[in-house]
Image (cartoon, rainbow, N blue to C red):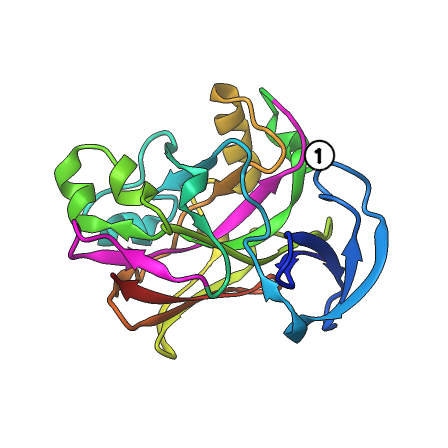
Amino acid sequence: MRVVRFSTGDAPAYAALDDDSTRLVALKGDPLFQAAEPSGEIFELDEVRLLSPVIPRSKVVAVAKNYHDHAAEMGGEVPATPNIFFKPNTSVIGPDDPIVLPPWTNEVHYEAELAVVIKTLCKDVKAADAASVIFGYTVANDVSARDAQRNDGQWARAKGFDTSCPLGPWITVDPALDPHHLEVTTTVNGEVVQSGNTRDMVRGVPELIEYISAAFTLLPGDVILTGTPAGVGEIVDGDRVECTIEKIGTLGNHVVRR
């Protein structure tokens, strides 16, 4: 099942979308906070505007250099312990929302990543219990201003600016889904520019949840970005960037400079 957050011009709503279906079954309320109950409304996928499937109530926690090949292309090695940072919830946008390049940067990169959505308040979660706190998975683009990343000495501005965290197109909720054997692909203007597989993550989802929750209490709707494979590169005004994760979906956004 896929959970969709959408709009028909009114307030955002949620729906369930079965695999290989275009029929949205609208839900009462937010399924992260109440049992999924149909509202009685039915929509077709092409009748609605998809929104970011979740707006984190608290935080997006991201993991840097969690693939050896990406660490190498960035001129370094995988850290001895996970290198984590935050993206504010104001950085989150949804499918087809524009990535707006800030005037203070001239070098912005895409980074396709598997994103984990947390379903319950939790702290000090053991890796063996990580599945019990996962609501589902979605696609993320950890948009990064590389010049600011190099110059600032920390990454808050470079990775946390408005529109720097596209999420979508929906949340895949499937206990049988193995997050460690999924193809990750990025295209820019239809050309494949990044290709990898989550099996090459240095630290898997359970280990990351254990490490992160030892430091921070996680809340329902919090999102964990698990790192990107090699092949990151620049996006510029006018580009269309699409990040695809096997068995989850494709997240597409246009790039603009205003």
Please identify the residue farthest to the bottom as the structure is shown: 190
Q: What residue is drawn where x is 31% and y is 40%?
A: 78
Residue 124 or residue 146, whichever sits in front: 146
Q: Say if the magenta span includes residue 115.
A: yes
Please identify the residue farthest to the front as the structure is shown: 10
Q: Position of residue 58 (x, y in %)?
A: 51, 31
Quadrant in which the N terminus appears: bottom right
Circle 1 — which element? Answer: helix
Q: Is residue 176 visible?
A: yes
* Quadrant in the rendering for residue 17: bottom right
Q: Is residue 1 visible?
A: no
Q: Position of residue 218 (x, y in %)?
A: 56, 27
Q: Position of residue 71 (x, y in %)?
A: 28, 47
Q: What residue is drawn where x is 23% and y is 33%?
A: 154
Residue 66 or residue 63, whichever sits in front: 63
Q: Say if the magenta span includes residue 58.
A: no
Task: From this view, report whether residue 144 is shown above or below residue 190.
Answer: above
Residue 102 or residue 240, whichever sits in front: 102
Quadrant in which the C terminus appears: bottom left
Task: From this view, report whether residue 224 is shown above or below residue 21.
Answer: above
Looking at the picture, which amino acid does disc 1 mark? Ser
Task: From this view, report whether residue 196 is shown above or below residue 161.
Answer: below
* Quadrant in the rendering for residue 149: top left
Q: Which residues are magenta?
A: 97-122
Q: What residue is drawn where x is 36% and y is 56%?
A: 111
Q: What residue is drawn where x is 85% and y is 54%?
A: 38
Q: Position of residue 240 (x, y in %)?
A: 36, 72
Is residue 168 found left or right of 190 in the rendered image?
right
| Residue at image mark 1 | 132
Is residue 104 found left or right of 83 in the rendered image?
left
* Quadrant in the rendering for residue 129: top right
